[in-house]
Amino acid sequence: MSQSRTVSKSASSRVVKLLVTLTCLAVVGLVLWQLLPRSTFSSDLSQLGQGKPALVMLREIHVMGGERTLAQMESLYPTWQDQMTFLLVHTGHPDGVAFAQTHNIGDGSLVLFDSSGQALATMGRPESVEDLRRFISVNLNPGS
């Protein structure tokens, strides 16, 4: 009888260890999934100067924080999508590296372009959606 209890405890112990291991792997996988850059907006910089103003955000792949700016852009997108192009460039791509160097910006920073592709203004990470809305409005309509 003692032999069967030992086998039973050993089997249940292995099941518990397996479940704990699988749970840990699932949690790590979920965290890594959340850290992946979202590709909500195009990264095609050839869209600059094509007749619509554009807002370009830089996302540095090894820096945390720009996701807040991205969320702010996503909340403004429905309002502005017909009037301007929204772009997202990553420093994990040569175009993103060149863009960051050209405009001297970092993660979460924004550059606003006019319809001919000329940079109008640059902004670091906005504090709020309202700050971002004001940045766009003031720089696209400087007389208003």
Image (cartoon, helix red, strand yellow):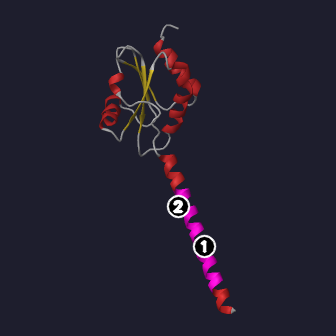
Q: Residue furthest top?
A: 143
The chief SS type of the magenta part is helix
* Callout 1 crowding tier (Cα within 10 Å): few <14, some 14–19, many ≥20: few
**What amino acid type should be assigned to the residue bearing mark 1?**
Val
The image shows residue 28 at horizontal and vertical percentages of: 52, 57
Find residue 120 and report its horizontal and vertical position in percent.
Answer: 40, 18
Give residue 25's mark: 2
Q: Residue at x 44, y 44 (%)?
A: 63
Q: Earlier in the sequence, mark 2 or mark 1?
A: 1
Q: As shown in the figure, which amino acid type bears the numbered disc 2?
A: Leu
Residue 40 badge: none
Q: Nearer the viewer, residue 131 or 96?
A: 96
The correct choice, above or below, for 24 with respect to 94 in the image is below
The percent coordinates of residue 21 (x first, y second) are 55, 67
What element does badge 1 sit on? helix
Q: Residue tagged by mark 1?
A: 15
Left or right: residue 62 compared with residue 2: left
- Which portion, as a residue range, is magenta? 7-28
Callout count: 2
Figure quadrant of the N terminus: bottom right
Q: CA distance from mark 2 to mark 1?
A: 15 Å
Where in the figure is residue 112, as x and y percent of width and height? 42, 22
Which quadrant of the view contains residue 109? top left
Left or right: 135 in relation to 52: right
Front residue of this view, candidates 78 and 136: 78
Asked whether residue 8 is drawn in magenta, I would say yes
Residue sitting at 58 percent across and 76 percent down? 14
Residue displayed at 45% across by 42% down: 37
Which of these two is toward me, 23 or 1?
1
Residue at (54% x, 33% y) in the render: 71
